[in-house]
Image: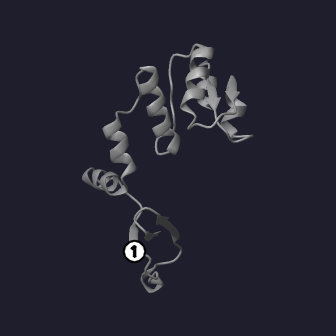
Amino acid sequence: MKTAKELGIYSIVADSVSGAPAKKHAAAYHEIDPADINGLVNVYKMQNLDGIHAMLGDVTTWNALALCKRLDVPFFLPKTQLEDSAVHKKFKDFCRTFEVEIVNERLLAENGEKMDVSIMDFPVLIGQHIAKQEAYAVT
């Protein structure tokens, strides 16, 4: 947002978080849930906007894609590329193809098993994939 402002781009932020940092650099902002597609359609039309952008990797990217589809406006990222970037294994395999350095990730537990902490190299960042019932560590 700061760069857009410096480039003279009129930008509006739609975010439900009060005091979100991007809001202070935007020309205007709306406190609205990024998942409220109907509300965002109204904002888009009311403000007579000509584009939509969302941070890649953020959950709002999917909402922005849905919003663009609803409004029949182009989005900077095709759905297939968004899906490839959202599936960590596909994304990491793609990075490895071009020798892009990636964060190491190790499966610690799955299906509700107890994590095997003996295999961890500290420090670690622990995360979980709720849908798959897996725990993983990023070292």
The image quadrant of residue 131 is bottom left
Q: Is residue 129 left or right of residue 90?
A: right
Q: Residue at x 48, y 28 (%)?
A: 67
Residue type at numbered disc 1: Glu
**Quarter-of-image position of residue 34:** top right
Task: Identify the residue shown where x is 27% and y is 50%.
Answer: 98
Above or below 68: residue 109: below
- Observer-nearest residue: 120 or 35? 35
| Residue that sits furthest to the left in the current view | 97
User: Which residue is under mark 1?
Assistant: 110
Residue 135, above or below 33: below
> Residue 22: horizontal and vertical position, in percent?
66, 35
Judging depth in this view, the residue of 91 and 122 nearest the camera is 91
Q: How is the image coloured?
A: one colour
In the rendered image, which quarter is residue 78 located in? top left
Q: How many marks?
A: 1
Under tag 1, what secondary structure? strand
Q: Is residue 102 above or below residue 128?
A: above
Q: Residue at x 69, y 39 (%)?
A: 21
Q: Position of residue 136 (x, y in %)?
A: 44, 70
Give the quarter of the figure containing the N terminus: top right
Instruction: Give percent across and percent down for residue 65.
Output: 44, 33
Give the crowd class for mark 1: few <14, some 14-19, many >=20 residues within 10 Å.
some
- Residue at (58, 34) in percent of width and height: 36
Looking at the image, the residue that sits furthest to the top is 48
In the rendered structure, the answer to whether residue 79 lies left or right of residue 49 reads: left
Identity of the residue furthest to the front in this view = 38
| Residue 32 point in image, percent of width and height | 65, 34
